[in-house]
Amino acid sequence: MTYSEEDYIKAIYHLSKDLKSFASTSDIAAQLDTKASSVTDMIQKLSDKKVVHYKKYQGVRLTEKGEIYAASIVRKHRLWEYFLVEKLNFSWDEVHDVAEELEHIKSEKLIERLDVFLGFPKMDPHGDPIPDQHGQIPDIKKILLSAMKDEQRGIVIGVKDSSSKFLRYLDKLNIALGTEIKVLEKEAFDNSMAIVIDHKTVHISAITAANIYIKT
Amino acid sequence: MTYSEEDYIKAIYHLSKDLKSFASTSDIAAQLDTKASSVTDMIQKLSDKKVVHYKKYQGVRLTEKGEIYAASIVRKHRLWEYFLVEKLNFSWDEVHDVAEELEHIKSEKLIERLDVFLGFPKMDPHGDPIPDQHGQIPDIKKILLSAMKDEQRGIVIGVKDSSSKFLRYLDKLNIALGTEIKVLEKEAFDNSMAIVIDHKTVHISAITAANIYIKT
DNA sequence: ATAATTTTTTAGACATGGCTAAATTAATAA
DNA sequence: TTATTAATTTAGCCATGTCTAAAAAATTAT
């Protein structure tokens, strides 16, 4: 597959996952910042290659082959994101564009070795699951920190807001990927929280808590 | 620059370094496994972009701009090779093709962070120097193990033969990148050597010694 | 149910990077 | 020095992936 074909497959994958079971020509065009006519052309080609089901005027769905291919691209993207944040100290909001390029590198061996090197992470820095070699998505239930109860423990697996402002704030709080957190008390008045990080108690606002993903 | 343009720039860089000061159309074609006519077309374009000096029928030379660009590609290629071998446990003969793809990833930040992560290596796994950010090539004098004198010490920085057969043999001898070696004695009869690796003495043939690069 | 609007597809064009075959220039041999 | 051979360039074609403009189909609004 060419880089371009891979971009289309990934876009269709995300659109059909997030919205409904099929993706419309114009949704794909919007997603990829291209024109509907270009999308129609490409869809034709992908249909010939049996990675999408396509009937004129009715949008597209990935075939099983397409699903597996898409999952492998997402896998690469998320493993690279994890690498960039964990090993190269990129911040969580800087990784996307670079991962967008790296995800197209064609080497099965490279990605499996990277997986080993990283210790088989299950989530990327945004808290999204990393599909395995077979395209299976681990169903780890992530919840927002704001949804946790008093005395509950969990591990930070991602963020919802990945603006550098927020990330710098998290740095100050000593919150990073993998940080263990225990909720001490949730204040009913404003939903702010007292939590324990590294044996120290800190207070965070409801807004902050609603932007941190936790694995319990 | 496109991937293709970068491939041409790198090819011209290597040809003019290794052979003479200019690269001929047919040499470039051979290097890139393409046709002379395609090379002529691309050379025209690179000339328009001021990365090569070109006069019809007289081959090409990189401009200063071209040299700098080429060095940055070589830098990326060699840093990635180092990463693959040191971090992902690729063997020295497996890295080239993957590095060939990775070298095109466009992110200044990525490559500088990678350099930091790897500890600013000066040589890739084949013993070739890694240019710095400014395209400067460190002039570390590498010699062949076979050229070392009795009692001399050095560090393994690369191999000449990177067949998997040879690499597996080196593994058996516990010789890797960075391994410190001391020559005990060179046998005048067949040029075989007794060397010390990790406090243990091993005997290697002249052929083996002539395929290992050492930094003294 | 038909008209108006939106979405999608088709048709035709363009840029990139490759090819073959023919023409041109340079290099080598007689 | 001319003829032959080799290298290089030109001309014309093709595939990929994009675009605009026009046509066709589907959706919605009256």
Image: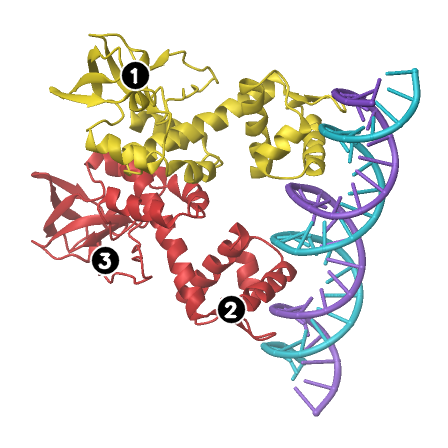
Chain colours: A red, B yellow, C purple, D cyan
Camera-nearest residue between A102 and B14:
B14
**x, y (%) of residue A194?**
12, 46
What's the mark number on residue A185? none
Distance from Cα at disc 1 to Cα at disc 2: 55 Å
Camera-nearest residue between B6 and A124:
B6
What's the mark number on residue A50? 2
Residue under label 1, please give it: B145
Up-down relation of residue B68 to residue B93 (above or below) = above
Q: Mark 2, mark 3: which one is toward the viewer?
A: 2
Q: What residue type is disc 3 on?
A: Lys
Horizontal side, residue D26 vs residue A99: left or right: right
Q: What residue type is disc 2 on?
A: Lys
Camera-nearest residue between A7 and B139:
B139
Q: Tag 3's secondary structure?
A: strand
Badge 2 and badge 3 both on one subunit: yes
Residue under label 3, please give it: A142
Please, which chain is the residue tagged with disc 3 on? Answer: A
